[in-house]
Amino acid sequence: MKDRIQFVGVDLHQETATLAVLPDGAADFSRVETLLNEPARLRRFFESVSKEGPVWACYEAGGCGFVLHRALASWGVRCDVIAPSLIPRRSGDRVKTDRRDAEKLARLYRAGELTPVRVPSEAEERTRSLVRCRWALTRELTASRHYILKLLLLRGHRYAEGKNWTHGFWTWLRTLELQGDDVLTLATYVELFEHKLALRQHIDRRLEEIALEPAWKDAVARLARFHGGGESAESGRVLAMEGRRK
């Protein structure tokens, strides 16, 4: 019986995609196939399935992002990206295979028991990636501080005039008289720290520009007022929070 909705559960991986087709009202799957995760192959598959009726596809949100969702939309296929943490799970069901996962998604999708996530725009994804890059640089800066302090500790040097990383600390650090290769080691650690700091400052400037764009401006202003700080100081934090929410 044609024109029935064809519910397709997709177990998506970097290299492959397992697709299970469950027609509306059918007792069993009409097709279950594992294909290479390549646009041309997937498009042929969905074009073939669409001959039997409208296609509704779904897959779990994960490391493959929203590339498939956007491809399906461009091919005229409805697609929902599912929140993995909200998928109903039976107690004791620990057997996982690509086929079982795809079939499970199709069954639950047809039954209306899955919760889709909001798919961000490509511009939002790029901003989110930039914020994550800033987080990575912040972790790297912390690591660089540890490298410097560890070297100083091993050589018996400690800044006693105040807190580390202040102007006074850096002035003191540059007056230290180290021996041998320690001079090169410390210089390298300091240069590495300064390079990472410059990279983060460059990202911060870009985030401040993004925070003034219409898509973000109101949210940044609200959070800045809540924290009692300037908009530029809150730009990265707002963009990170909004990226998580969306």
Image: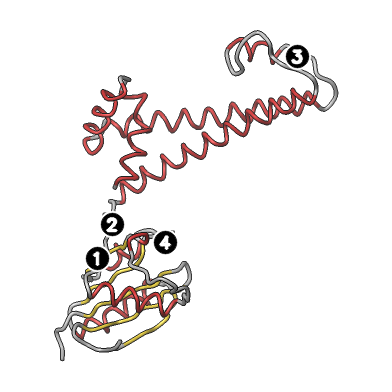
Instruction: Give the vertical position of 187 relative to 237 (above or below).
Output: above
Residue 141 horizontal/vertical position (percent): 57, 31
Q: Nearer the viewer, mark 2 or mark 3?
A: 2
| Location of residue 172 (image quadrant) | top right
**Labelled pair 1, 3 in contact (Cβ < 8 Å):** no
Nearer the N terminus, badge 1 or badge 3? 1
Q: Nearer the viewer, mark 1 or mark 3?
A: 3
- Using the numbered discs, state the Cα–Cα distance from disc 4 to disc 1 in whole angstroms: 16 Å
- Using the numbered discs, state the Cα–Cα distance from disc 2 to disc 4 in whole angstroms: 14 Å
Nearer the N terminus, badge 4 or badge 1? 4
Q: Is residue 118 left or right of residue 233?
A: left
Residue 150 horizontal/vertical position (percent): 72, 28
| Location of residue 223 (image quadrant) | top left
Residue lying at 68% horizontally and 31% vertically, measured from the top left: 147
Q: Amino acid at mark 2?
A: Val
* Residue at the spot of label 3: 176
**Labelled pair 4, 1 in contact (Cβ < 8 Å):** no
In which quadrant will I find the N terminus?
Answer: bottom left
Residue lying at 25% horizontally and 67% vertically, measured from the top left: 79
* Residue at the spot of label 1: 73
Nearer the N terminus, badge 3 or badge 4? 4
Residue 99 horizontal/vertical position (percent): 42, 80
Instruction: Give the vertical position of 171 relative to 142 (above or below).
Output: above
The residue nearer to you, when weighing 115 against 73, is 115
Nearer the N terminus, badge 2 or badge 3? 2
Q: Nearer the viewer, mark 1 or mark 2?
A: 2
* Residue at the spot of label 4: 64
10 Å crowding of disc 4: few (<14), some (14-19), many (20+): few
* Residue at the spot of label 2: 117
The residue nearer to you, when weighing 219 against 214, is 219
